[in-house]
Image (cartoon, rainbow, N blue to C red):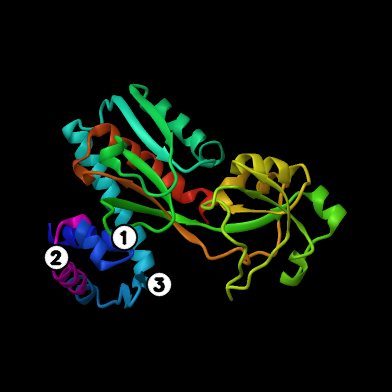
Amino acid sequence: MGRYREMHTFVTVAQAGSLAAAARQLQQSPATVMRTIAALEARLRSRLLIRGPRGARLSEAGESFAQRCEHILAQTHVAECAAAGLHASPEGPLTIALPLLIDAQVFTPIAVAYLDAFPRVRLSIKACEGVPRLLKEGIDVALVVGALPDSSEFALALGKARPVLCAAPAYLAKWGRPVTLDELNAHRAVVVSSPSQDPPWRNSANRLLKPARVLTCTTQRGAIQAAMLGLGLIRCMSHEVHGELASGALEPILPGWAGEDVPVHLIYRHGRRAEARVRSFIDFVTPLLRRHPAFH
């Protein structure tokens, strides 16, 4: 039991990204979590976590150990559920909150596979930007792109989404491909009217760039469609144009310029005490989302 607890604590820290966040999820003090990790590192004679002012990150040995621990814990959980019959027949309504445009690009095929496996569950999907209030809004599970507040309950890290700048091949053939930041000011852009969707175009040095805004749309979906028709450059998140980039309908411009990667998490309430339909959903979709190329 001691080794199981150490593995569970270590995986929670690895997924949460900090000792404090892991302590909240485990409902333990940070000091207790630190002692558990220290005891594990001492027993293994290996440094698993590299602690810093911005949290804790895995060492190379920690990365490998975390993957093996996740597999062991997942198999243990499946075995326990099978013995107890907890996931034998998940059923009832399940409400999922997703960012706009992630449904068709990423989530719908996974949702179809989940419903094939658990046909007695009824999925309801809500569009949601930012971090929803799960209990108040009646949401069971939410996929969140961006930083989580300290008050977030249970969270599973899925990977990273990246900001991208892209354009259609037809636009690049007509207006040329920008290869420097200075050239962006001579180009045309399709933007979104919402401030949350259309922050100023700045590089890592906080330099403001001003391509000509030839079309302002009320939705990101409309802006992406206009960009695909060759109207101008568009800045968006990688998961929002995953299919278009994969098919070549849009091409990336100046990779890395648009900004730093942002974390992607699943958040939910009650942890392992969650109802069968919530736990079955978390266990089913988490490995699929972690492997999805939109989050790498």
State the extent of the magenta-drawn residues as a range.
25-38
> How would you classify the magenta stretch by its main secondary structure?
helix
Quick one: SS at disc 3?
helix
Q: Is residue 244 left or right of residue 178?
A: left
Residue behind mark 3: 60
Q: Position of residue 93 (x, y in %)?
A: 31, 26
Q: Are marks 3 and 2 in contact (CB under 8 Å)?
A: no
Residue behind mark 1: 16
**Residues under labels 3 and 2: Cα distance?**
26 Å
Residue 279 appears in the figure: no
Residue at image point 34% right, 52% down: 156
Q: Nearer the viewer, residue 291 or 186?
A: 186
Q: Is residue 168 left or right of residue 268?
A: right
Quick one: SS at disc 1?
helix
Depth-wise, is mark 1 or mark 3 nearer the camera?
A: 1
Please, which residue is most extreme toward the top here?
A: 120
Mark 2 residue type: Ser
**Residues under labels 1 and 2: Cα distance?**
15 Å
**Residues under labels 1 and 3: Cα distance?**
17 Å
- Whether 77 is among the magenta residues is no
Q: Nearer the viewer, residue 178 or 210?
A: 210
- Residue 209: quadrant of the picture: bottom right
Residue behind mark 2: 29
Density class for disc 3 (Cα within 10 Å; few <14, some 14-19, many ≥20) is: few
